[in-house]
Amino acid sequence: MSKKVSVFTSVWSAVICAVIYGLYGLLPSGGNVSFTMGWAMFIMLICFFGMRLKPKNSLSMVLSSLMGCIWGQVYIILIFLLVPFVGITAAGILSVGIGTALVLIVQGGVLSKTPLGLIPFNFVGIALTFSQFQGHMGDNAIALVVTILLGIGMAVLCGLGYNVAEKIFIIKENAIDTIDHA
């Protein structure tokens, strides 16, 4: 990546992240739907850039994350089902073991070649579901889904900034090289 592309993408991404995070802060932060997890949007950036995804992967990011939220509920259901038999600690351990095996078999195996198969986004959905669980199924689910969608939108917009920078600066650099060699 050229220095100009890097600087442009950095500034572009900083502005995008600041604006979206700032707008997120205007959402309600109390009651049944509480937007108090703006930090979670940055986890989407980690996955997006860490996996070297492109904006065209946005549908897979959304579907895999939302599938992860469903899996998170499955883990929680498993805990509730197991507690009467083995206690809370063992139920948590067994739930995580069984749930993780199922996610990796289903998402990483059976569905790996589908838009649901981005394993890191599956586990982000699971982790964020755990972060919102306060003892009731579906705790803060609406805010969770909106936060995930905004985080993916933020990542995609950052990725588009890179695409724009690459087109602007690489084309210019190639044109200059052509003139220099003429």
Image: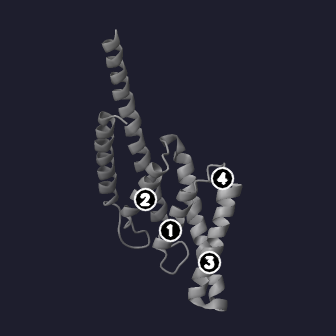
Can you identify the residue that label 1 sits on? 127
- Which quarter of the figure is the C terminus placed in? top left
Disc assigned to residue 43: 2
- Which quarter of the figure is the N terminus placed in? top left
Dot 1 or dot 2: first in sequence order is 2
Q: Distance between the residues labelled 1 and 2?
A: 10 Å
Dot 4 or dot 3: first in sequence order is 3
Relative image position of residue 76 (x, y in whole percent): 58, 76
Check whether the beta carbons of the residues at disc 1 and disc 2 lie within 8 A of each other.
yes
SS state under label 1: helix
Label 2 sits on what residue type?
Answer: Ile
Can you identify the residue that label 4 sits on? 112
Relative image position of residue 136 (x, y in whole percent): 53, 79
> Which residue corresponds to the image point at 36% horizontal and 72% vertical from the top-left?
30
Check whether the beta carbons of the residues at disc 3 and disc 2 lie within 8 A of each other.
no
Can you identify the residue that label 3 sits on? 95
